[in-house]
Image (cartoon, rainbow, N blue to C red):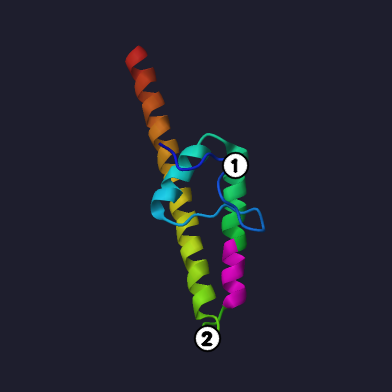
Amino acid sequence: MPKYTYSYWPRNSDNAIILTSTDEAFQFATHLYNNTARLSDLQLSHRHTLAKFEKLRPLTEDNLLPLLKVCYEIQFYRECLEEVMRLKAHQNDYLRTIKDVSM
């Protein structure tokens, strides 16, 4: 059973989706793979997080924990985007198989 729906998924003050684990990233991907607008929102959040990472660099003793937190966010967004691509590829393979069988 899903933990959240797309509409009720936790978000931060920038309205970006909050992913806290790989499982959540994979679950969230199932809400996105066939919705281009939602996927664009996730890609935008990923880009904003990458920009946050660049602002925090270089690594110092003062920004170690914020930098680590941003690194986790980047990882979870990347995993979610990769899962979306995997789901799309799987769906395309399935549709090709159905088309081949029906011919």
The magenta stretch spans which residues?
A: 49-56
Is 32 or 5 nearer to us in this picture? Answer: 5
Measured from the top left, where is residue 55 in percent x and y? 62, 74
Q: Please state if 62 lies on the left or on the right of 75 as rendered.
A: right
Measured from the top left, where is residue 83 in percent x and y? 42, 46
Magenta span: helix, strand or loop, mainly?
helix
Residue 92 in sight in this render: yes
Total of numbered circles in the picture?
2
Label placed on residue 38? 1
Q: Residues within 10 Å of mark 2 (few under 14, many from 20)?
A: few
Mark 2 sits on what residue? 60
SS class, disc 1: helix
Q: Please state if 64 lies on the left or on the right of 96 as rendered.
A: right
Residue at the image point whose x is 45% and y is 43% from the top? 3
Q: Residues within 10 Å of mark 1 (few under 14, many from 20)?
A: some
Residue 84 in sight in this render: no
Q: Image quadrant for the N terminus? A: top left
Q: Please state if 96 lies on the left or on the right of 8 as rendered.
A: left
